[in-house]
Amino acid sequence: MARNLITDVQGILVGNAADVRLKSGVTVLLCEEPAVASISIAGGAPGTRETDLLEPDRTVAAIDAIVLSGGSAFGLDAASGAVAGLAAMGRGFAVGPARVPIVPSAILFDLANGGDKNWGGANPYAGLGASALAAASTGFALGSAGAGAGATTASLKGGLGSTSAIVNGFTVGALVAVNAVGDATVAGGPHFWAAPFEVGGEFGGLGLPSPFPPDAAALRHKANAAQGGNTTIAMVATDAILTKAEAKRMAVMAQDGVARAIWPAHTPFDGDTVFAVATGRRPLTAGAIDLTAIGAVASACLARAVARAIHEATPAPGDLVPTWRERFAAAAR
C-alpha cells in the first residue's frame, strides 16, 4: 500500500495531538462522510463513551468520527472537543433542526507514566481532541504520537501503530494505541509475536526467534497492574459496504489480531476495545466469503499495527520504560 496506514481506506482521515509534558495525547479518526461502525470489547477494564449505539440493534446508523485518548476517565472529554469541531462543520445526526455529531471514543490509562498530570481544574483533553480533529489528514505520525504518546507495555514503551492491506479488491486498515498489560515481544526479546504477519520489514524484519525460547509462554506483565490501568484501543476499517451486523463481525474477528500480537491479551486489566468502520465504497460480491476475508485481514493488520506501534516508539525525558530501539539497538540495525 502507498502509505501502509489506515488512511489507505478511502474516506478515512486521521489526526494526532499530544502534550509532551503531559506524556499523553489524542488520536481522531475522521470519516469524510458518515460511516457504518460497530465495536467489540474483549478486555475486562474498558473505558468508553457512546459505544452502546454501535450495536446492530441501535437506532443511529452511522458515525462521524472515533476518538482514542490517553488520560483514563479524564480522556473521555477528548470526544467533547471533537464533537464541538464537527458541529462547527455542520456534521452530525439530524434530529429535527438540530445536528448531533456521533463520536464514540475509548481511553487508555497513562496517568502513572512519568508525565506531569497536575493540570488542576483545566482538563486538557477537550483541547487535544479539537486539535487532533483539526489535524486530520491522510498522513500522520506513528510511535510516540497521539493516543500512543504515553503508552507502555510490560517491558517496553508502547505507542500508536497503523497498517493496511488489500484483499479481494477491498482495502483494509488498522490503527491502534498499544498500552497493554502484557508484552508484544517473545520472552522479553526483540522478536515480535506478530512476526508471521509482517509485511516488508515494517517492524524490523526479524521474524520469530530460532530456536524458540523454552520460556516463551511464561507470563510477563506489568507487576502492579490495576483494574483500568492499561488498555489497548484500536480501529479497523474497510472501504466495503457493510451493515452494522457485518461491521460487528469484522470487529470481533479483528480482536484476534490483539491476541496474536500481545501475550497475555484480553486480561481483567485490559480494555482491548476494537472499533470497525466501513466507508461504503465497494459492495460485497461474494457475501459472507468477502466478509470472512475482510475480517481475517483486519486481524492480521491489527497484529502488524501493534508491533509497528512499539517498533516506532521514541524516547522522551521522564520515561519509565525503554523503547524497543533503545533496548534492542543491535537488532534494530
Image: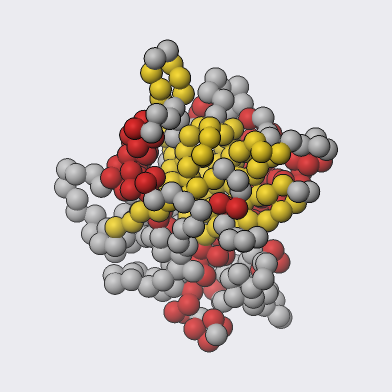
Give the percent coordinates (x, y) of residue 298.
66, 50
Query: Which sits in the foreground, 282 or 319?
Result: 282
In the image shown, does 250 or 66 lie closer to the viewer?
66
Relative height, residue 279 to residue 90 (above, below): below
Task: Tell me where residue 79 sits by quadrant.
Answer: top left
* Residue at 51% from the left image edge and 63% from the top image edge: 309
> Which residue corresponds to the image point at 40% horizontal and 22% vertical from the top-left?
99
Is residue 248 in view from this perspective? yes
Using residue 108 as the reference point, say whether residue 11 is left or right of it.
right
Q: Residue at x 17, y 43 (%)?
A: 121
Judge from the rendering whether residue 171 lies leftward or rightward of residue 98; answer left or right.
right
Please give the count of numbered marks on the rendered protein: 0
Residue 76 on image: x %, y %: 36, 40
Q: Looking at the image, which is closer to me, 300 or 112?
A: 300
Given residues 141 and 219, the one toward you in this image is 141
Residue 226 appears in the picture as rendered: no
Q: Residue furthest front?
A: 89
Q: Give x and y (percent) for residue 162.
A: 55, 57
Q: In which image quadrant can residue 193 be found? A: bottom right
Q: Which quadrant is the N terminus positioned in?
A: bottom right
The quadrant of the rendering that contains the C terminus is bottom right
Q: Is residue 283 above or below residue 144?
A: above
Asked where in the image residue 223 lies, by quadrant, the reply is: bottom left
Residue at left offset 19%, top offset 53%: 118
Instruction: Please determine whether, in this image, residue 326 is positioned above or below residue 89.
Output: below
Type of colouring: secondary structure
As drawn, the residue found furthest toward the top would be: 96
In the image, residue 210 above or below residue 235: below
